[in-house]
Amino acid sequence: MVDFRPPPARQNSRWVITITALVLLCAMLALPWQAREAQAQQPTPEIPSRKTSFSINVDLYAWWMVRWSNNAVQCEIVVDHEGAPTHDEIYHYCGEELYEDWFDTSACELIDKGEDTSQCPGVYLSWVGQGVGEKTVNVDLPLPDVWLSLEGCTLEPPINRCSGQPSLIFDAYEPLPNESVIRINGFYGGQAFSCAGSRCRMPLAATGTQGLPLEFWAVSSFGDTSEHFSALIRVTPWGDFSNPEAPGNDPEVWFVDVLSSQWRSSRQASCGETWQVFPPVGGAPGWLSTPDDASLLESALSYYYLAGMLIRNGNVDASQCPDGGLAGENLANECGLTQAYPEVVAWQNRFNGEIMRVALDSGVPAQLLKNIFARESQFWPGIYLTYKEAGLGQLTEQGAGTVLLWNTSFYNQFCPLVLHQETCDRSFGNLQASDQAMLRGALMQQVNASCADCLVGINLEQANFSVGIFADSLLANCRQVDQMFFNITGEHAGENADYVDLWRITLANYNAGSGCVGDAIEAAIANGSDLTWDNIRNYLDIGCRGAIEYVDTISQVPAPQPTPTSWLQPGGGLPPVATGQATGAPPQYQTTPTPAQALPTPYPENTVTPYPENSPTPTPIQVLPYP
């Protein structure tokens, strides 16, 4: 049995304590009375630590580090897992010098020859035995939380439109049993406020278009406080009822916007919080909206490429059409599109439910997501070997890097599915190039729904799952754009451009990259131009100007007309656009024949295990080293 007990603690001698006390007493008597008075004041109470510890019984495994030359034990290593100790464990128990000695030691070849192993240099690990011991675990306990909502008005989604003067409600929660929130404190527009208890009601008045800053926190009976949270509040009265000089008969209407991580009353402002900018009063334009129901995302557009892929993968029979319904390898001809049209309509609306779910969860506008998928892939979520773009939103390897670098929460969940947790803890920017490449490739596989063995060549479960990844990609681009503005101007993006233009700039960043967009912003500033999209687009380099058409196409409502991406149409020419009605009527075609062009073929790849949605985050724990 291995002895796992710690060494006995040293005892202080009584005479040491006595002399120390006398020295301190003499020093205090020698101080002037003012200093003694200061010493008599109550010390600042120490904030209690939200930690608890508990012990659990574990199987422990003991190893010795032994020197070959004399069989002397150099150190003992105790671990809670089977198998040899890890490098980190050896370093922890034996120190740097012994670890380096062990690391440099080669296998002793004299063992196989039956000769004296004391001639071998260095050290080796020797198994000692197994025992049962106690392991002390320290757990960080959660802090109180405070959430924001509205009261006194009936919200009318998708905008916060109130028919009466609104009040902001603070609800605080104390997670510890036998403890409670005793007060909510904060500053609103620079003015301090405080409410007793765990709930606070603050009537809101008009703030102006820029809003007012809010800072707030909860005080616990435990003796500490919650995190200090922040928000930006905008309250806008609408109509003559608020005119103090000549109030009219307009009904009382208020628009309320809240930018905060603690806002739970309705949909999140998404990137608006990152940029620190509000949407337009009354709501954003349709292409930046999320409707109340997925049915409002329905579209019935004619997509030549989608029709071609449905024909090629056997989902539509166009054998009676010329050339089997195909113009070239992947585009449908007129007859093929006619045959495929009912399935084209069904397919382009297949992902509406998942788009709505992801939009409500992430705050990324649902119509924006659908427009991007229409423009990028015409809703065919395959992969293209030649161009290395994958999924509904055609993620590139560079785009995968943007997600992993700028969306920390996504990276923290995704990386451990591919690499060891210790490697992931270094953050994406600090990983070795080979590890970064591995993560980018794994992410592209996650959005690739090509499936050679599936009924229509697409793994629909994988395609639905990838919708959330593309929302995370847009959030990452929002953060990159905000940081770009801050690096160039020293201010948040919202202090330089409005909400709608910032989404256009983010789309340009998603399509053309940060180099293109950053250079254009700097050029606009150098020429004294306001940082609107209409100005910034004029300063895009010639190699970046494809982003202009990309942004213009996506910022339409309803969904964009079928416009294959530039790599689908190498000459930039587009096939004739077929228009369909939402009623499902057959499309009406232009007379220009569809050009037959050879296009890249979706490349089937094996799918990998989906990245789990809503993965729980474990409570951080600290494991104390074993004695």
Image (cartoon, rainbow, N blue to C red):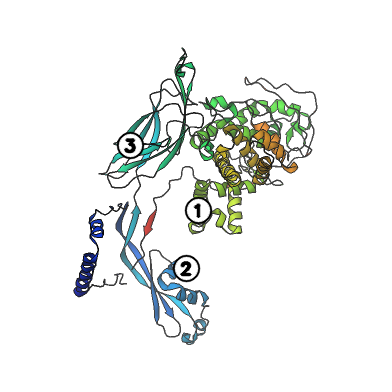
Is residue 455 in view?
no
Question: Mark 3 near mark 1, Cβ–Cβ under 8 Å?
Answer: no
Q: Which residue is mark 1?
A: 416
Indicate which disc residue 163 carries. Answer: none
**Cα gap from disc 3 to disc 1, whole angstroms:** 43 Å
Q: Does 610 sit left or right of 314 as displayed?
A: left
Return the x and y of residue 619 as percentages of the image width and height: 39, 50
Question: Mark 1 near mark 2, Cβ–Cβ under 8 Å?
Answer: no
Question: Mark 3 near mark 2, Cβ–Cβ under 8 Å?
Answer: no
Looking at the image, is 87 positioned above or below residue 343? Answer: below
Return the x and y of residue 130 as percentages of the image width and height: 35, 69
Mark toward the viewer: 3 or 2 = 3
Residue at the top extreme, as displayed: 249
On-image quarter of the C terminus:
bottom left
Mark toward the viewer: 3 or 1 = 3
Return the x and y of residue 132 as percentages of the image width and height: 31, 65
Which corner quadrant of the image does residue 336 belong to?
A: top right
Choose between 72 and 309: the one closer to the eye: 72
Amino acid type indicated by mark 1 = Pro
Indicate which disc residue 87 carries. Answer: 2
Among the two numbered marks 3 and 2 on one chain, the one whose residue lies closer to the N terminus: 2
Choose between 310 and 478: the one closer to the eye: 478
Among the two numbered marks 1 and 2 on one chain, the one whose residue lies closer to the N terminus: 2
* Kind of element beneath mark 1: helix
Amino acid type indicated by mark 2 = His
Amino acid type indicated by mark 3 = Ser
Q: Does 498 sit left or right of 164 as displayed?
A: right
* Kind of element beneath mark 2: helix
Which corner quadrant of the image does residue 602 belong to?
A: top right
Return the x and y of residue 143 as percentages of the image width and height: 35, 46
**Cα gap from disc 1 to disc 2, whole angstroms:** 20 Å
Q: Which residue is mark 3?
A: 194
